[in-house]
Image (cartoon, rainbow, N blue to C red):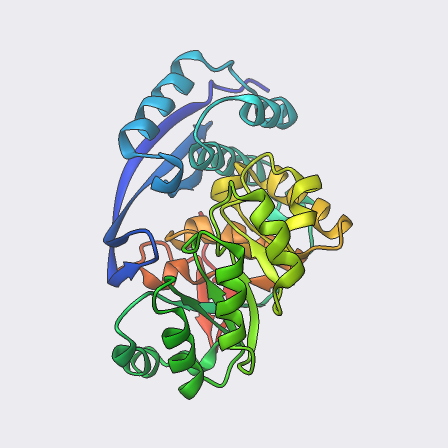
Amino acid sequence: MYLSMMEWQILPLKLELKYTWKISRNSSVYKQNFIIHCSQDGLIGKGEIAPNIRYNETSDKILAAFNDFVLNAPKFELDNWDAFETYLFESSLPNALKFGLEAAFVHLLAQSKKLSLPAILGIENKKQIGSCYTLPIMETSELEVFYNTYHLHRFPYIKVKVNAEKATEIVTAVASFCKQPIMIDGNEAWQKAADVIAFLDTVKNLPIQFIEQPLPAHLDEEYKVLKQGAIFPVFADESVLNKPNFDALETQFHGVNMKLMKAGSFVNGIRIIKEAKKRNLQTMVGCMVETTLGIQGAFYLAAMTDYADLDGCLIVADEPYHFLTENEGMFELNAVTH
């Protein structure tokens, strides 16, 4: 059967947010993402790119790298997924772009074979996945109102963004009205392991599940100290990119948060989760601020992990795809297809 040449397109997608998204290093009221179209013989596969400024993934760099890919990458056939995956993994393209390209390719492949994405990926297809919900940094006096306004009691876990200066105040305030276990997300807010250990001692009687990436990713020795001295598990986030050093990670952390936008592909995301499990590390699948087009990928892989953070689509004011539905803190697939 004759196959026409695969065509690629990138489309900007500005996502207005329901509220200011503030973490320890920045804040935003909208997110500039991109949608990738991969088309062939009347079928279109779609992937999402959620750039992360932490890794210098600006909009201009995403567009420039995409144009370079279209002009210079080899021409791949749909039945040559392995070669496409290897090319992306070894390329210097931004990781978020790699995932958008691979997701579009794989969605196109699934359509052509009339298979589900879990079937293509060879993973379990869970019907429902429970997720945490993340509170951005805000004034302590606003936390309970925010929690009640968005009916956050329905989620199995609450994740709390903190900065170093007010971490104890923020977490203590949340624990005063929140009955769920709390995940603390530092986004590299501290500089010394001793300071994180001291902070954790101030909340030792609270229902803390773990603390996520409290120190900058490059502070390897500080993380070794922190792992030994922390009274709660320490999870890696910014320390886990597309080629994580697991020999180092297992000396520094108790768990890892894998995000597809940083792993660069479904295949590599699965590889990272499996390697983490092999090293007896706890696992979580997370997301950026994305639509349900991107987060459905995290939904599928969450069947493999201990925890899931899928709430990035709930922050979007007018989510355009509706591939996932959340009810009582549980995500499930809608009946729509693309």
Q: Residue at x 49, y 46 (%)?
A: 238
Query: Count the marks: how many?
Result: 0
Instruction: Give the image location of residue 78, x and y in percent.
Output: 57, 26
In depth, the one of 282 and 224 nearer the eye is 224
- Give the image quarter of residue 63: top left
User: Can see residue 168?
Assistant: yes
Q: x%, y% of residue 248?
A: 66, 41
Figure check: 5 above or below 161: above
Q: Quadrant of the N terminus?
A: top right
Q: In the picture, residue 146 is in which quadrant? A: bottom left
* Coordinates of residue 284 in the picture (x, y in percent): 59, 57
User: 213 or 42: which is nearer to us?
Assistant: 213
In this view, 129 is above or below 13: below
Pinpoint residue 28: horizontal percent, then vertical percent: 24, 53
Viewer can see residue 52:
no
Residue nearer the viewer, 311 or 228: 228
Is 258 above or below relative to 158?
Answer: above
In depth, the one of 161 and 269 nearer the eye is 161
Does residue 161 appear left or right of residue 236 in this picture? Answer: left
